[in-house]
Amino acid sequence: MQLLGKTNIDFIGMKKFTFIISSIIALIGIIGIIQIGRGAANMGIDFSGGTAMQLKFSQPLTIQAAREALAKGGMKEAELQEITGGNQLLVKINKSDLSTGKVADSVESIFKQAFPANPFTVESSTEIGPSIGEKLKKDTLVAVALSMLGIILYIAWRFDYKFGVAAVAATMHDVLAIIAVFFVLNKEVNLLLITAVLTIAGYSLTDTVVVFDRIRENMHKSLKDPLPVVFNRSINEVLSRTIVTSLTTFLAAISLFLFGGEVIHDFAFALVVGVLVATYSSVFVASPIVALWEKPPVESKA
Amino acid sequence: MNKGYTWRISLILAFIIASFVYLTPTLVSPLPAWWSGLLPKDKIHLGLDLQGGTHLVMEVETLKAVEGSLDLIATDLEDSLSSQNLRFKKIGRLGGDKVQLTLYDRSSADSAQVLVKKKYPDMEVLPVFEEGGFVNLQLRINEKEAQVRKDRAVAQALETIRNRIDQFGVSEPVIQREGIDHIVVQLPGIKDPKRAIELIGKTARLEFKLVDETVNAATASTSTLPEDDELLFEKRTDPATGAISETPIVVKKKAIITGDLLTDAQIRIDSQYNQPYVAIDFNSTGARLFDQVTAANVGKRFAIVLDNTIYSAPVIRERISGGSAQISGSFTEKEAADLAIVLRAGSLPAPVKILQNVTVGPSLGADSIRKGLVAGMIGVALVVVFMGIYYKLAGMVANLGMVLNILFLMGALAALGATLTLPGIAAIVLLIGISVDANVLIFERIREELKLGKTPHAALDAGYDKAFLTIMDSHVTALITAAVLFQFGTGPVKGFAVSLSLGIIINLFTSLLATRVLFDAFLDRVHVKRLSI
């Protein structure tokens, strides 16, 4: 069976249109990163410091009632979120003046007093001091920078620096796209998101490398043809495998997203988004950049 | 490359057998009796997010440890100077790095200086200066020495915490030093995390101090107290109402005996009132001191102080020799048991601060495992069906490769005694998708070669050869990010990185070697005209 027969799509020709789309996505992503840097985005407590608790009540409890109880107990700043299935409630309190260890206790006693008829169990509780958050932020930046550097060096070694830069540009594009989506949907930026982003960075390269390999092969084979033609032919040749490889990974990611449970829901969502944009970027971002750069072909071959 | 499948098949079979052997301790419980000797016993460990438990990151307040050792030097100098009949006005710690001796005249300052230099060669003696008619002599702890003390404090705290946890009884705890002054504690499957944290985090500095009855505690305030006194509170919990009452008591600042002199502490139950108390035994120095102090102070009260809170302040009725005493107070049996543990394990050299506390209940962990498994099964099913339809028989070979991949990965995780976390499960599920990718690259190549009119066997060879570099490149790049994640990640993220990097390496093996050998074996034996691809 085949998804696609022989295709002949002018991918490089679409670059005006796709570059605009990609620029907008990247711009939103950059705004997102700036907001994250300022702490203005929806930061997970692992970065901002604070307390998060997952409570399981024995009877249904409205968010409204829970919020009122917390406000009465002096925890107005608590963010509440309902977890689908089983009367579960997520309570998140960013930075607080109370010392670590006290917030979770106060939340527990507030709920115990406010809803004596509705006992609950603490399914999980996480308290993180601000100094840990700061350290984590720094570590994360180092990690992202290191992996990007490693990738540039490897691709530069295996191909040439133009391919390397283009591959990294495509990877950055995917990273920005995931952040843009999370930022726009106001989803939480936490350590798991960073993990997903770095995973996708690796995955995105896989996709890009497949296309680049073919471009390089065809460039050696047909030196006479104009570059856009070679690029388009290469992308068309590998189009079905680009789609199939993404599809299999997509299938795995989507089953995690749909059935993997609350804890990794957002993580799986980032993977799903990442697989989609990684496929797009290898065709519409990475290759056109090299094509633009390599022009005119005669000089670059000299 | 057509020949030589004997060794390839043997290698694959060996891996399959090894994986099953390594997985046995994880899957079979309890292990049969004959499972012994060289056979592996390591299991795949479940991360705290899967089995429930508590993960703590604590900071040892090392500055306090330095201050503490300066306080000790000050007390020690007071004793030495007194025993040499050197008169002094005051000796005390100044700031975080100095001890100041205030003396009446130069000559005694000079003698003190000689004594100090001999006793504390590591301390820096600052030039003597006069102020308000007194002569001041300052000792400063140098940076290096302070560092040594800080370092020792963290090492000691680690040891004490380990002792406490061992005595508390937690199976497979992890207690590690991290960075300069952090300690990481993992308590898997702990039932009462609050109690454990209380126990671990308590400084447990036990002191016996004489009560100063000449000062009225009820009206005393820090400004009116004599210089060598301090105001502490005795806390009592009413067993019936749970109300806490605080009684102020003025005690001498200087402790007569400290907890370092203990050899044992045990919980006992008072037969008369059915009240728990902690019986303590002193070592010989402690016993002698206790004997002397009680003999000299019959009829007075002394306070038993733990971390600056008074547990009780009994009257000394008679001289107590023999080196035993008891601490009673209004505590429950659990509290008394925990107090005995912390006293036995010794006090922390400096207070610790809890920076991070992640606690996961066991039901959430079980839920995560179940959902992770379901997601994995569905992922496998989707990919298997897709590959079967799209690549027919060849697709089924790729599916077999994927199953091998998962088997090998689990085997490797077990062999390394690695920890599986929820993101780790996610990595395995993701790997289901990624592992067929390499085969897709190969199959697409083979299809292209077939279109060029090559025979099945030639197409197969060309497909594998030409796809090799692409597969290599894509795996190495993925491995770079996985390695970085491994390096900087902690806990769940590290679990993810471990699963992912192992998976990538194993995938390289199965896609380039394992699936290929099936094709080769098949094509060699059966003469096929058309590949089912």
Image (cartoon, rainbow, N blue to C red):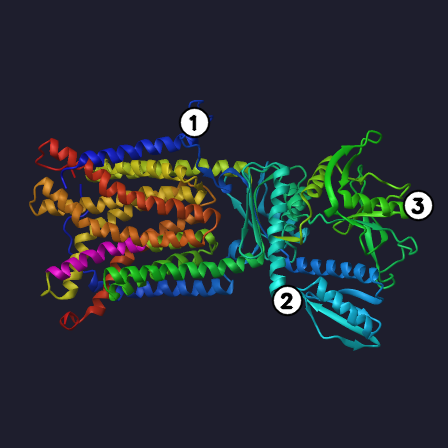
The answer to whether dots 1 and 3 both sit on one chain is yes
Q: Which residue is disc 3 drawn over?
A: B299
Q: Quadrant of residue B83?
A: bottom right
Quarter of the picture holding the N terminus of chain A: top left
Mark 2 packing: few (<14 Cα in 10 Å), some, or many (20+)? few
Does the magenta portion include B142? no
Task: Residue A231: give x, y in percent of width and height.
Answer: 18, 61
Q: Which residue is disc 2 drawn over?
A: B142
Residue B40 visible within the image:
yes
Q: Against A99, is A56 above or below?
A: above
Nearer-N-terminus badge (2/3): 2
The answer to whether dots 1 and 2 both sit on one chain is yes
- Magenta residues? A203-221
Q: Against B348, is A160 above or below?
A: below
Q: Which residue is disc 1 drawn over?
A: B36
The amino acid at mark 1 is: Ser
Which residue occupies the foreground of this view, B286 or A139?
A: B286
Q: Against B195, is B270 above or below?
A: above
- Secondary structure of the residue carrying tag 2 is loop
Which residue occupies the foreground of this view, B389 or B43?
A: B43
Prevailing SS of the magenta stretch: helix
Q: Is residue B290 left or right of residue B507?
A: right
